[in-house]
Amino acid sequence: MSVRHVVVVGGSTAGATTMRELRGRGYEGRITLLDPEDGTNRPPLSKAVLADPGNDATVGMDHRGLDVEHVRGAAVGLDPSARVVIAEDGERHHYDALVVASGARARRIAAPGQRGEAVLRTLADARRLRERLTTAARVIVVGGGFLGMEVATAAARAGAEVTVVDVEAPLRRHLGPYLADLLVARAAAIGIGFRRSAVRLHADPVSGVELDDGTVLHADVVVSCVGDLPETGWLGTSAAVTAHGVLVDRAARTAVPHVWGAGDVTCHAQGGSARRRPFWANAVTQGRVAAASILGLPIDAPIVDDYFWTDVAGTPLKAVGRLPPGGAPRVLEDAGGGDGVLAWGDEAVVAVGVRRPAPRLRRMLSELGQQKPPA
Ligand SMILES: Cc1cc2nc3c(=O)[nH]c(=O)nc-3n(C[C@H](O)[C@H](O)[C@H](O)COP(=O)(O)OP(=O)(O)OC[C@H]3O[C@@H](n4cnc5c(N)ncnc54)[C@H](O)[C@@H]3O)c2cc1C
């Protein structure tokens, strides 16, 4: 069937990349985008935007020049047999190909009705949090993943006394012990404190957290950075949806004919189970794969990309390859004081505390693979 109308639900990184890629590869048919907003490039929200209101204007997506009909409303339903997406105003949008790129929302831990929990997913969240940080003396960040550590950095720089509370050692699950310990030490050096515990948010409105042992830590702001949940509600009981999100194959296809998925809303089969990888590079690569697949072109990229970056306590980190790395690294470039470019066998190359372009790190990783003696 020739594709003459692509409907994209969600116009942020994954959806915008799909649309750009469709046009870039010569698609001249209709594209309809459903999104109540313009779309947001989220990584700067916890970095540049929390630090400076001057950066607010830099995160919006620009769909001009793509010849896209932008319907400013949410998708609320899917009728796969009629190949129709239903918008919140009741309008039915027929598609030849549908791209589900509705992303994710912040997971919250507040009890029903409990007010005052801060999260960071949207530009509005970032603005609210930045405003609260201007007067906060004490801040608690629940969750020591990369987002929690970036928020803790921003809060410490705003002058607050900051404590990160997590049941696990911060950053270890994603970055492994060597890199996690290095970044946690840098965070401790700018005054960020750490506690290991599960928490319950304390009081209404929230004014702290209660730890496992009953201790209450008080704070002016409590920010939950405890992961995100895929935005699948509008898909109802569609076969595209699993407990982990919209399951896609190597060509970004879902189980439903004519429906593709890309970005944070998706999950992928891995080792007999489904796994989400909600990172920017995956949203980009999956947008590209979805576009190629819709147009019947060869798929020239893996469905999961291996590039990740963060910036904690003034230490930028860029990684390509398989994370988390185990054991001690080999130092490829030594910039002193633990900074430099590090390699874990031919599995991962990581720039810590020094800025190196991702393509250069990828080249280094590929050269390490070529140096490896054949098995
Ligand atoms: C604060 C923050 C910092 C981050 N920093 C990094 C980082 O340093 N490195 C990194 O690799 N990754 C980072 N990430 C992750 C990265 O930003 C995400 O992987 C990426 O934004 C996913 O893009 P997406 O388009 O799939 O989803 P989203 O960005 O969530 O976009 C989904 C879009 O769908 C729209 N939508 C939702 N529901 C509907 C509906 N029913 N109908 C119509 N439209 C809908 C939304 O309005 C939104 O525009 C960060 C994420 C956050 C929140």
Image (cartoon, rainbow, N blue to C red):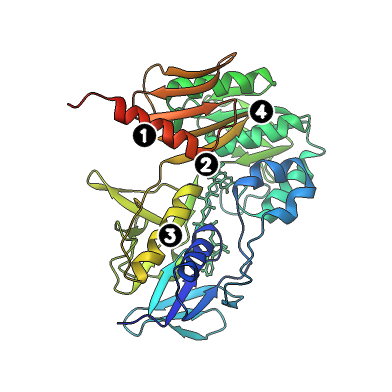
Question: 234 or 277: which is nearer to us?
Answer: 277
Return the residue at label 4. Answer: 314
How far separated are the C-alphas under marks 4 and 3? 32 Å
- Asked if residue 244 shows in the view, the reply is no
Residue 192 bears which disc, if any? none
Q: CA distance from mark 4 to mark 2?
A: 22 Å
Disc number at residue 226?
2
Question: Which quarter of the picture shows residue 35?
Answer: bottom right
Q: Are the residues at dot 4 and dot 3 in contact (C-beta closer than 8 Å)? A: no
Residue 288's disc number:
3
Residue 211 image offset from top left, x and y in percent: 56, 29
Dot 4: element: loop
Between circles 4 and 2, the one closer to the viewer is 4
x, y percentage for residue 371?
30, 25
Q: Earlier in the sequence, mark 2 or mark 1?
A: 2
Q: Quadrant of residue 132?
A: top right
Quadrant location, the N terminus: bottom left
Task: Please name the residue shown 39% across and 70% down the image.
Answer: 236
The amino acid sitting under disc 3 is Arg
Specify which label sits upstream in the sequence, 4 or 3.
Answer: 3
Q: Within 10 angstroms of label 4, few (less than 14), some, or many (20 or more) residues?
A: some
Distance between mark 4 and mark 1 Cα atoms: 28 Å
Name the N-terminal-most of marks 3 and 1.
3
Give the alpha-carbon distance from disc 2 to disc 1, as whole Å. 34 Å
Residue bearing the label numbered 1: 366
